Image (cartoon, helix red, strand yellow):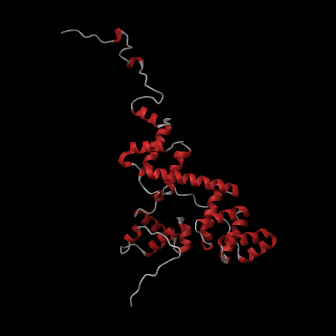
Amino acid sequence: MSYRLLQWEGDSTAVPAAVFKKLGTTAKEEFFRVILQILSTQDTDEKHIADALHLSAGDVEKAMIFWQGAGLLSEEAAPKPLKARPKHLTTREVYRQSEADPAIRTLLSEAQNIFGEVIAEGDCNVLVSMYVNDHMTLEFLLTALSHLKLEGWKPRDMRKAERKLLRWQEEGVKTAADFDRYLKQQQQRAAFEEEVAHILHVPAEQFTYGERCKIALWYEQFGYTEPMISQAAVSAGGKASVNYLNGILKRWHAKGYRQVRDVLAAEAGQNASGTKQLAPEDDILARRKTAVPKFTKE
């Protein structure tokens, strides 16, 4: 019997070529399950992965080390793990809570309107748990769900959405107004990343979490813009990368360099404010005649 591949019009996830290169090697089956789970959810929390795939913590750790060696994962500057929280409400508890708080019925009804489809019982429980256990406001939840819907998320992604919303909450995003400001900040940071990607001639999508944090630091705390970052890339030469540029820019910031002319002046042996003034003992024209050594003819 022969087969042909059917056209797939459902959800899909891009798989890096590095994964296919490991097919046929001695890599274990659970290694592939782990990396596919990460690619699907963008969640690298080892406990979440172990729970989702019914693997031991040790198996997940081995898989993470394997894919780090393959160049797909980095352990640098990973987001802090989410704090421990109560278990999700059961369906009975959700019903009981909705009897006491009509806002829960509004939340479920409006959420279904946002997604345009019925939300499964388990996903409803997750959503209501965020409202009851995590004290997320109705306005914030509906605003966040609307944003995720525009990005292509589905009701079945509610557990993944929960982690995203909890992360936002830990970053101080707790109201709809906070969320609007956060989105604008994220859009601005995305523009920063695109600018750096253009300077380095790499796709912005390849930046790790740690690299994105460094890029935000350059713009938001150091106050640097494209000219300074481009100059750092020139100084780095063939070694130009986010991590290498970060070392250069940190040194420049510590030395008080704010503009490219400050860097160029320093490289030319001048102070940022102008021509370097020689100390009297270093200036031969300013020395007293008696200080000039005398030479006798032999």
Direction from residue 169 to residue 213 in the image, left or right: left
Image location (x, y in percent) of residue 20: 39, 71
Image location (x, y in percent) of residue 196: 47, 50
The answer to which of 184 and 288 lies nearer the viewer is 184
Q: How many marks?
A: 0
Image location (x, y in percent) of residue 117: 66, 76
Direction from residue 10 to residue 97 in the image, left or right: right
> Does the rendering let one see residue 175?
no
Residue drawn at (46%, 44%) of the image:
229
Residue drawn at (44%, 43%) of the image:
248
Residue 187 vs 39, above or below: the answer is above
The answer to which of 214 and 108 lies nearer the viewer is 108
The answer to which of 116 and 12 lies nearer the viewer is 116
Image location (x, y in percent) of residue 70: 40, 64
Quadrant hosting residue 24: bottom left
Quadrant of the rendering where the C terminus is positioned: top left
Residue drawn at (38%, 88%) of the image:
2
Direction from residue 238 to residue 85 in the image, left or right: right
Residue 269 vs 221, above or below: the answer is above
Residue with the most extreme right position: 100
Residue with the most extreme left position: 298
The answer to which of 183 and 270 lies nearer the viewer is 183
Residue drawn at (38%, 18%) of the image:
283
Direction from residue 180 to residue 2 in the image, left or right: left
> Does the rendering let one see residue 115?
yes
Quadrant of the rendering where the N terminus is positioned: bottom left
